Amino acid sequence: MGIIKPDIKFKRELGRLSGSQLNQCMQCGNCSAVCSLAPAERPFPGKEMVWSGWGLKEKLIGNVDIWLCHQCGDCSSYCPRDVKPADVISAIRHQTYLHYARPRFLGKLVSSPAWLPVAIAIPVVVIMAILSLAGTFKIPEGPVDYSAFFPHGLLNSTFSAITLFFYLLASFGIVRFWKDMKRLTPPGEAGMKKFPIARVLGEILSHSNFSGCGSQQLRKIAHMSLFFGFGLLILVTLYAIWATITHNYPLPFTNPFKIAGNVASLMIYSGLGIMVFQRLMNRSVFGKSSYSDWLLLAAIGLLTLSGTLVELARFGNWSVAYHLYFFHLVAVWFVIMYLPFTKMGHIFYRTTALLYARSIGRK
Ligand code: SF4
Ligand code: SF4
């Protein structure tokens, strides 16, 4: 077995992100005892707190248990030394996105305020370049018609290709994550089961892990609103792409998919509203909100709001319709293309970790 070296820089970063005094942990194990999601064998987050105090990055990045935690905050509430284990676990997840991001600057781009101007400038410049090459980078005359500004075929092909490119880069990180989980938490003698895809899908869709985790029912409702609102919006977007190909676009207000899109927006507004309220009003339980937390909430909020305004601008023939549309496209890039490198990356990392955990019988 190789020698594991403490990484003091990593430890400091965990302390900074979580606002936790890691050296104050007295290893009492209370946090593991109260966690309703921790397995009986090698429970979390007690052992992770010890490793964090020692700066054992190699044991923490790629640790499957970090992703079984659903951030209810119970462990922090019962910690006698106020070390905030829930926030430390969240900080380790944040470090995981950065660790597996390739190229590395993509992780930094969405995790540091200093990089925000660059993160915004990239989609602005690329979209301007696409429109300039297409010769449509000007305000069209007549009633609002977004396809005269950004032809649908060009929009669908360029945005799909860019999204696939970003997700392909992210997939390399996920493969490395899987290998690290196997190395750090190898399957027992029984080996690995077949992929329990249906079971993991059931856990995700039902949000059953939120129910088993503390008493934060409101947080479960907020997450479900965002999750299903987003899912519905993706379905509506796929239909809209198909509609542009079959020349059945734009959709009238009364089209069922249009109505579904507006319902999805309402679900996202509700989920976001609850999350922001909880982060502001319930800090002792919810923990410290980082720059990445706020950036993600702001990006999703601006994406949804700009989508609503773009729709109203088309029906109302607003003079600023194309400016709003440009802003909306930048917001789409920010949330969808950067997704694997932001906190939204948990969609991939948590799903992969759940698949691994359940396939080795870790419950
Ligand atoms: S983090 Fe708190 S509850 Fe957990 S072992 Fe350390 S002191 Fe005990
Ligand atoms: S935040 Fe909740 S789920 Fe996560 S380790 Fe603490 S008690 Fe367990």
Image (spheres, rainbow, N blue to C red):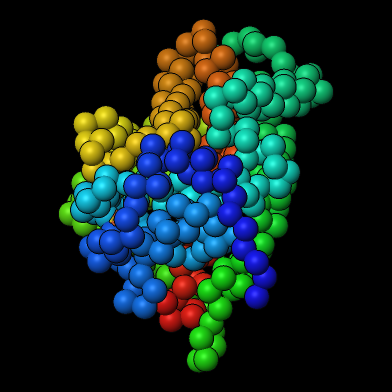
Which residue is depicted at the point 66% across and 62% down? 176
Would you identify the image quadrant in which residue 162 lies?
Answer: top right
Query: Residue 145's x, y, as percent?
Result: 58, 21
Q: Looking at the image, which residue sits at the far bottom?
A: 190
Locate residue 146, reporting x and y percent. Answer: 59, 23
Residue at position x 66%, y 56% in the image: 173
Is any part of residue 246 visible from this angle? Answer: no
Q: Is residue 150 left or right of residue 306?
A: right
Observer-nearest of 358 and 23 = 23
Residue 329 place in picture, x, y as percent: 58, 28
Instruction: Name the residue nearer the viewer: 103 or 320.
Output: 103
Pick the residue in front: 245 or 182: 182
Residue 124 vs 101, above or below: the answer is: above
Query: Which residue is at the far right?
Result: 133
Q: Is residue 272 left or right of residue 348?
A: left
Residue found 53% across the figure and 52% down from its top:
55
On the rendered structure, is 63 left or right of 129?
Answer: left
Residue 270 point in image, percent of width and height: 28, 37
Name the image quarter holding the N terminus: bottom right
